[in-house]
Image (cartoon, rainbow, N blue to C red):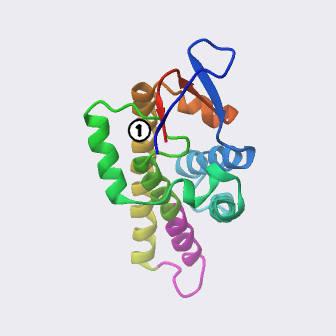
Amino acid sequence: MAAVVQQTSGRASAREVAVWDPLVRLIHWSLALTILLNGTFIEEESKTHEWIGYVALGLVGLRLVWALIGPKHARFSAFPPSPARAIHHLRAMLSGDKTVHLSHNPLGALMVYNIWASVIAIGITGYMMTTITFFGVDWVEEAHEIVFNWLVFSVALHVAGVAFDTWRSGVNLVRAMINGRKTIPYGREVE
């Protein structure tokens, strides 16, 4: 399944591969912005907080649809959730493997699904707090806060994982999520 990258671009030491389409990148950065705004700058009890939450929920919904119908690297099949593959990937990394994954690596895939599920849970509990039935119900508010705290922790792990994988693989993942292209070092195996 892995292949060794040969030089195919004008650069002497790397090749570029188009990976993330514009919609994936727009959703990624927009979702990051909604989390940052609602978690840091917007008052929790405000209508703005509520609407930003709905936007976040809509972004995840759109991304899930795109994972069914979008281009190759955006699809669920490009990064299936697999704890067994994640454990194998972790062991391989610890033994010095520097294989580049064109989509998410197996650990990154689990993180993506975790973040999406967390945003959905926050959106559901947030909506519940606006209904007559659940308004002021302690367990709903506590669940909303607990899942948000889990999301913040997950985002911190995600950022650390991106930094680590950039260092490990030599592929600048932040740049790839900005321009949609992974620059893969010459001679590096690719999955």
Q: Nearer the viewer, residue 98 or 55?
A: 98
Magenta-tinted stretch: 119-136
Considering every residue shown, the one lying at the far top of the view is 12
**Mark 1 Cα within 10 Å, few/some/many (few <14, many 20+)?**
some
Q: Is residue 105 left or right of residue 54?
A: left
Residue at 31%, 36% in the rendered image: 93
Q: Please provide percent x and percent y for residue 151.
A: 45, 54
Above or below, 175 relative to 109: above
Q: Nearer the viewer, residue 130 or 5?
A: 5
Residue at 55%, 78% in the rendered image: 128
Q: Is residue 81 left or right of residue 37?
A: left
Q: Please provide percent x and percent y for residue 35.
A: 57, 50
Considering every residue shown, the one lying at the far bottom of the view is 133
Residue 14 quadrant: top right
Q: Nearer the viewer, residue 147 or 177?
A: 177
Q: Nearer the viewer, residue 49 or 1?
A: 1
Residue at 26%, 35% in the rendered image: 94
Q: Which residue is mark 1?
A: 161
Q: Please provide percent x and percent y for residue 131.
A: 60, 82
Residue 61 quadrant: bottom right
